Image: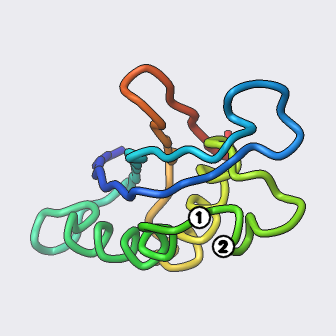
Amino acid sequence: MYTVTIETEFSAAHIIRGYNGPCSHPHGHNWKVTIEAKTPVLDSLGMSVDFYVLEKKAEEVVSQFDHRDLNTTPPFDHALNPTSENIARYIFDELKKRLPEQIILSFVAIGETGKYTAKYSEA
């Protein structure tokens, strides 16, 4: 199995609704997004997943959050809390829809800070 990893980022604010602590107040992060994809075969050029294609598809999803208040941005504008876990799952699901079938997403990880990261995978 061949595996590639890309990183991107976005800046956004949020609050965690219903949380009893400092994250219940408006605050922001420079969110780091790490995406790992894999495929069992190489194409005729010897590539498994084109970094450029993966990055562009990821930007289609992530750009809707950049410099936004996540609590006013779908799908986090109502009941779904904009936690790192929910953001990772949303990006995973949306990115999976945009990629060719032969590309398997391993995971999407969201880092709020240098110390805290949440990861979503289907396995």
Mark 2 and mark 1 residues within 8 Å of each other at the beta carbon: yes
Quadrant including the N terminus: top left
Which label was assigned to residue 73? 2
**Residue reaching furthest to the top:** 115
Tell me if 106 is positioned left or right of 3 in this view: right
**Residue reaching furthest to the front:** 25
Work out whether 71 lies above or below 57: above
Q: What percent of the width, then of the height, locates residue 85?
A: 67, 42
Quadrant including the C terminus: top right
Q: Toward the viewer: 42 or 70?
A: 70
Secondary-structure class at tag 1: strand
Residue 55 in which image quadrant: bottom left
Residue drawn at point x = 68 percent, y = 27 percent: 22
Q: CA distance from mark 2 to mark 1?
A: 7 Å
**Residue reaching furthest to the left:** 45
Give the number of the mark in front: 2 or 1.
1
